[in-house]
Amino acid sequence: MSDIRKVTPADAVKDGGCLILDVRTDIEHRASCLRAAHVHVPLDTLDAKAFIAEHKLDGGKPLYILCRAGARAAKAAAAFHQAGFDNVHVIDGGILNCETCGVPVKKGEVISLERQVRIAVGALVLLGTLLGSFASPWFYILPAFCGAGLLFAGVTEWCGMAMLLARAPWNKAAAGRAPVKSCCNM
């Protein structure tokens, strides 16, 4: 979608008449989130039509969408356009740009998904190398597979390991409570 409207992070948080939607995963949101009032609904669970109805969006007030760097926010914006809501803007550069621009961000006490991927891949490479050296050379396939996965993730910006880890029990909302829907002045 080429006609995506963007807004700077500073303009998004100072606009009191807007609604900010964070579409990052639960673990990303718990690792860092805006201190400004916002709603968190992961992109993979977002139903644009239901969201429009729930928040009574009529086009009068803008909807600003936030993700890590902008790609998922653009997908969410396209879903809102397809659902008939056009007053939607992507926060330029996502949460990464918010931090760079000095927009207040709350840091959580969780290990980021990116760090979890590095830990898992590092452990698999080490394990494959040790087993390849001491048990059977066939175990060298494991570090080669990890290297191919990292190369693929770097080229396509899609990481299967991150998708798998995002669904791990420790990265989900705490058992017994619904996922975070509203985070106001955290």
Image (cartoon, rainbow, N blue to C red):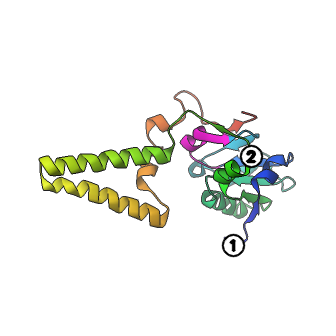
Can residue 47 be seen in the rendering of this structure?
Answer: no
- Magenta stretch bounds: 23-33
Residue at label 1?
2
Indicate whether 53 appears above or below 87: above
Is 31 colored magenta in this rendering?
yes
User: Residue 178, located in which quarter of the rendered image?
Assistant: top right
Closest to the observer: 81 or 136? 136
Rendered residue at 49%/45% (across/down): 113
Indicate whether 7 appears above or below 165: below
Q: Is residue 175 left or right of residue 94?
A: left
Can residue 136 be seen in the rendering of this structure?
Answer: yes
Q: Farthest top residue?
A: 176
Helix or strand or loop: what does disc 2 sit on? loop
Residue 90's disc is: none
* Residue 101 image point, x, y percent: 73, 51
Amino acid residing under circle 2: Val
* Residue 165 image point, x, y percent: 43, 45
Residue at label 2?
103
Is 138 colored magenta in this rendering?
no
Classify the position of the N terminus by image quarter: bottom right
Q: Is residue 170 left or right of residue 37?
A: left
